[in-house]
Image: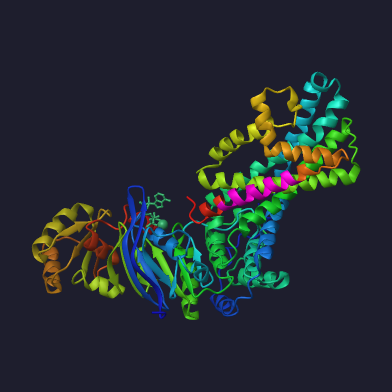
Amino acid sequence: MTTQTAPQTAEAAPRPAAIASALASGSRPRRPGALSESLTFGWRALLKIKHSPEQLLDVTLSPVLMVLLFTYLFGGAIAGSVEDYIAFLAPGVLVQSVLIVSMYTGATLREDIDKGVFDRFRALPIWRPSALVGMLLGDTVRYTVAAAVTAIACLFIGWRPAGGVAGVAAGTAVMLVFAFALSWIWTFIAMLVSSQRALMGIAWIAVMPLVFGSNIFVDPSTMPGWLQGWVDVNPVSHAVTAVRDLMNGVSAGSELVWVAGWSAALVAVFGTLTMWRYRDPR
Amino acid sequence: MADLAIETQGLVKVYGATRALDGIDLAIPRGGVHGFLGPNGAGKTTAIRILATLIRPDAGTARVLGRDVIHQAHEVRSLVSLTGQFASIDEDLSGRENLRLIAKLYGYGGASATGRADELLEAFGLDDAAAKQVKNYSGGMRRRMDIAASLVATPEVLFLDEPTTGLDPRSRNEVWDIVRALVAHGTTVMLTTQYLDEADQLADRISVIDHGRIIAEGTSTELKASVGAGSLHVRVMHRDDRERARGILIRELGVEVEAMSDPQALVAALEDRGRVTRAITALEDARIELAQLSLGQPTLDEVFLALTGHAAEPGDDAEEAA
Ligand SMILES: Nc1ncnc2c1ncn2[C@@H]1O[C@H](COP(=O)(O)OP(=O)(O)OP(=O)(O)O)[C@@H](O)[C@H]1O
Ligand SMILES: [Mg+2]
């Protein structure tokens, strides 16, 4: 044991003279502004993915499993054949995978708050929502990855979207905007509960009616009346219809207006609630 | 009133049945170190978090550098920094990334953000670890990293919440050096601590806080003077002699003599220093050998005991020895 290359040196010590000069040169530049601050926080989210890329694994694996499961389990029963069903299911399951991945945004936020990271951000002279907005912007990268992997899985088992690349891209864009808006529900819940586990519990309960009480898996015309009523107002149904139309090369028309309206409303309500709790989180 | 760094009136914060702060009045001038000394749960963190605009008081007002912490919170934030009791840096990012992130948020551009980060990393002796994720840092490195992150833009007031709790003596000395450098630069430092010697070493003035109230305030000399003539510390050579020595000292000094957790040590808070000589002669006559004998200014430990009627912190001795 004589060939120890890394010497066991003590940790380097701080240098008071250098600290003094660093203090003297610490005058503040101009404030960067809300957009730039948000983008900086988005950059932080990307850095976290860079340091642990394995966090992309769970966001990609589960949507693929969903696609395979539903297509082969229900495809024959619901639409007669796997090919027919995948044409119906693919856009919906894309939306579903993004929604489920978006819940992890709330979990990340809760972890940041618990670890005290947000205390520092909250003490900075910046536009207060920027830490959250930036986090959600950074997470759209994860949503995009989830959507892309799901789309590839669907293509693999026979999905041929009539809207082509342009239609799929447009549908994906609508989906990302909707997911960004919906994520404010998770950030609000993250501010209310005291642990990540409680958060995921509540989020799953909330996401169930949104995902399954929608037109993602089956045509609602076969459902009982009360359920059809819910499916009609469910914002997820509107998002799915819009995405489906765009990917199928059909004009999405009024559905796009619905999605825009719902997205604005979600941000207005849950964004405000989140920021209200953000002032004094537990 | 803008010449005061911190000014509060009747600050109250209630958590359920706990009055974390129960009417705090402070008037802290600019410059130097103001110590906030108190045991666990005294309300130190709560007070600091209100002053740094992280939480809102339930009653009372607080101004930092003349700005109200509720109505001018943004202005306060642009003048102060907080290094919290628990690390508030992103463990998943490297040290350099953490500092670049904060520099960017203060408005440094890409290259100058990196420059500022590297300047601080070097000054704090973290340049070798700059590219490592913070989760791999030692406790002392994390603390320095956390303080460095608070100095990306030089604050006029820096809040340090228990900056040396859990650090080894060497890291603690390093943090003390950093605090002294800040003070030399003209930053006002408000420091909370449970360590009486830390307040003694660093703080120009000390507020002693207990159960959400300020129970005493002054320089460390003033606080000590308020409890009497100092104390006599005696350590007997053989622990079997201690009880006998205690009896003699009580008789000769005319005050209570406390047996410390060290089985050979005795401490007496003096009322009259003149009786000490006689007491020592009496010990000699009784053939009690002494290992150590000292006549000291009262320590802040004793101050705390005198002020609150209870010790500063259970297990304080063990902490001090660590
Ligand atoms: N978020 C909270 N919810 C409920 N009670 C709280 C909360 N924060 C503080 N308290 C209570 O308020 C009191 C003061 O706490 P505080 O953290 O200010 O003490 P402290 O002096 O910083 O103690 P320590 O030395 O342990 O850090 C304690 O009794 C604590 O339990
Ligand atoms: Mg505390």
Q: Is residue B122 visible?
A: yes
Q: Classify residue A247 by image quadrant.
A: top right
Give the side of residue A18 with respect to residue A90, left or right.
Answer: left
Going 70% across and 60% down the picture, which residue do you hit? A39
Q: Position of residue B32 (x, y in %)?
A: 41, 77
Position of residue B318 in the picture relative to residue A245 (left or right)? left
Q: Nearer the viewer, residue B186 or B295?
A: B186
User: Residue B283's x, y, as percent?
Assistant: 14, 63
- Is residue A53 something that shows in the picture? no
Q: Is residue A266 magenta?
A: yes
* Relative side of B41 to B181, left or right: left
Residue at 89 percent across and 44 percent down: it is A165
Please tell me in which quadrant of the rendered image residue A220 appears.
Answer: top right
Residue B160: percent from left, percent from top: 46, 65
> In this rendering, is residue A53 above or below B236?
above
Nearer to me, B294 or B152: B152
In the displayed structure, A227 sits above or below A134; it is: above
Query: Residue B158's x, y, as percent?
Result: 48, 70
- Which residue is drawn at the image coordinates 74% and 40% (left, top)? A239
- Check if residue B214 falls in the magenta segment: no
Residue nearest the viewer, comparing B232 with B30? B30
In this rendering, is residue A84 above or below A276?
above
Residue, x 29% and y 70% (percent of image)? B217
Front residue of A272 and A142:
A272
User: What secondary structure is the stretch in magenta mostly built from?
Assistant: helix
Stretch of the chain drawn in magenta: A257-272
Q: How many marks?
A: 0
